[in-house]
Amino acid sequence: MDTKLVKEVTDWLKTTDLAEFCYGNNGDSLEIKTSEALPEPAQFQSALVSVCSPAIGVYHAAEKGKSLPLSQGQKVEQGDLLGWIETVGKKHKVTAPCAGQLQAISVQEGAVVEFGLPLFFIEP
């Protein structure tokens, strides 16, 4: 493609409010995107604090033979045990990072979880 044509098109594009331009002719093609054409990353604010999985493994609410009933709306204190992630030969504690109220429980007993997956949401 002729570089002179590319320059003319980019100069022209600067005078318009277009964010993208695509052109094709005889097998040649040109696609130009301005910074305004880039998608903005999703941004949101939440008052909830997520409690994420510390490892890849299987979630258990408590050790075998013990009960740790968790329910939505339950009050928790910072450091309270919320369960375990069992990996090959190791158990990782899942604890509350802050005091507050459990607003959502997004994991079930015996579920396979990934590292960083939100398991709980706490409203401080």
Image: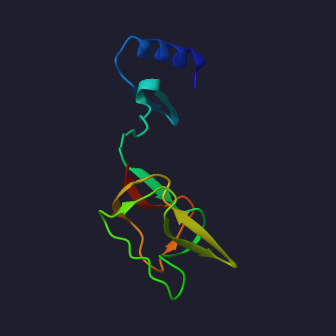
* In the depicted structure, whether residue 49 falls above or below residue 34: below
Q: Nearer the viewer, residue 60 or 15?
A: 60
Where in the figure is residue 93, as x and y percent of width and height?
58, 67
Quarter of the image where one finds residue 37: top left
* In the depicted structure, whether residue 56 falls above or below residue 102: below
The residue at the far bottom in this view is 65
The residue at the far front in this view is 77
Q: Is residue 48 left or right of residue 81?
A: left
Residue at image point 54% right, 81% down: 63
Residue at image point 48% right, 80% down: 110
Where in the figure is residue 50, as x and y percent of width and height?
44, 54
Colour scheme in the image?
rainbow
Residue at image point 46% right, 28% down: 33
Q: Nearer the viewer, residue 20 or 59?
A: 59
The residue at the far left in this view is 73
Image quarter (top left, top right, bottom left or bottom right) of the N terminus = top right
Residue at image point 36% right, 15% down: 16
Where in the figure is residue 14, as x and y percent of width and height?
43, 13
Whether residue 34 appears in this view of the structure is no
Where in the figure is residue 118, as x and y percent of width and height?
46, 59
